[in-house]
Amino acid sequence: MKDQKTKGCKNCEVNFSTTFDFCPHCGQKANDALTLRVLFYNTIGNYFAFDARFFKSFVPLMFKPGLVAKQFVEGKRLKYLHPAQYYLFVSIVFFFVASFQVRDYNMMANKAIKKGYEMEKNQIPVLSEALDTEDISKITDSIVKSKLSESSNSNLTFGYDIKKLNALIASGASEKAQLEAVGLKENSSWFDRLLRKQMLKFHKQEGGGIVQAISDTIPIAMFFLLPIFALILKFFYWKRGTYAHHLVFSFYYFSFLFIVLGFVLGVNYFLFDIPDWIDVLVVLSTFIYLWMSMKNFYQQGYLLTLLKASLSTFIYMVCIVPTAFIIILLASFLFY
């Protein structure tokens, strides 16, 4: 038998028959000549496929609570955009819209914190020359005795003597002395040392950008909070589907939340200020949507579903979200 002609794949370098149109090992096309069609066809094709499925999912997601999640779980998975992909796209748009409002809040917070620091600094004499440790100790002790009796009336309080720290910084004290001023001890743990260093950094930067740091942490936190919400649903619907089913429901529900809240934020910021009573109605409507979604997805009665929706929301908003917010604040401060 005559030897069959082969050629090597330029991607994985495995030889295969010239009769193959694709490499049987890695799947790359045998004729891989780089043309404009090859360069843009897949990208454009995938974009418009994504676009079409997004809008096919949009109307039923918004106006037929629970339908998209129910049909996706039942097997109609090419008709709608994948729930995780839908959530990711919507959350990116939402946090982009929210970033404009966050920027304003960040600027206001920066000004307020800076003003507080400036009021404290104005009470501390600025020293023109760097002093040695002994001189610094004498000066700061003197400040403590003569001026710091009014510390209880300070504009800012972070658990350490702000005026004493300002005196140390102004006099060119070492970082060790500054860290001791914010509470660092010789036997402090590594976590306490990290915390004190961040406190000193926060003080020197006068809290600038802390709101932005918190805002940047929230999208990451949501990837943990959403699965927890699905776990709560699993608790209430133990025998109705696997955890993956509850996760699908959660992805689509949170996508709905981000669409509605993003729309409200966008209108408030770019167009006009929506009356507060309308904002309250919007918040209430998201709970009603959750109730109807759970009713249609889990196929239980209205009253029983209302009870489960209420308990799920209560557990999530009263127990999970506050705990997560504390963790977000801590993480934002530690990586500030």
Image (tube, rainbow, N blue to C red):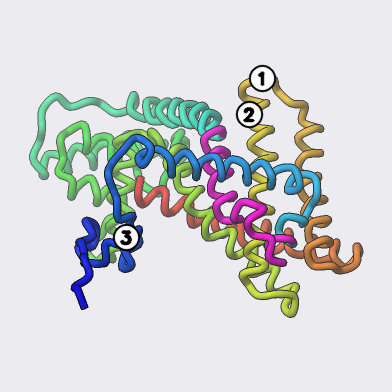
Asked whether residue 216 is drawn in magenta, I would say: no
Residue depicted at x 47% and y 31%: 106
In-front residue for pair 252/48: 48
Residue depicted at x 59% and y 49%: 86
Q: Which residue is mark 3?
A: 192
Which structural element holds mark 2?
helix
Give the left or right position of residue 4, taking residue 253 as reference: left
The label on residue 266 is 2
Check if mark 1's residue and mark 2's residue have beta carbons within 8 Å. yes
- Image vertical order of residue 59 relative to residue 84, above or below: above
Q: Earlier in the sequence, mark 1 or mark 2?
A: 2
Q: Which residue is mark 1?
A: 271
Place of residue 278 in the rendered image (x, y in percent of width and height, measured from the top left): 80, 32
Which structural element holds mark 1?
helix
- Image vertical order of residue 132 relative to residue 23, above or below: above
Viewer-side label of 3, 1: 1
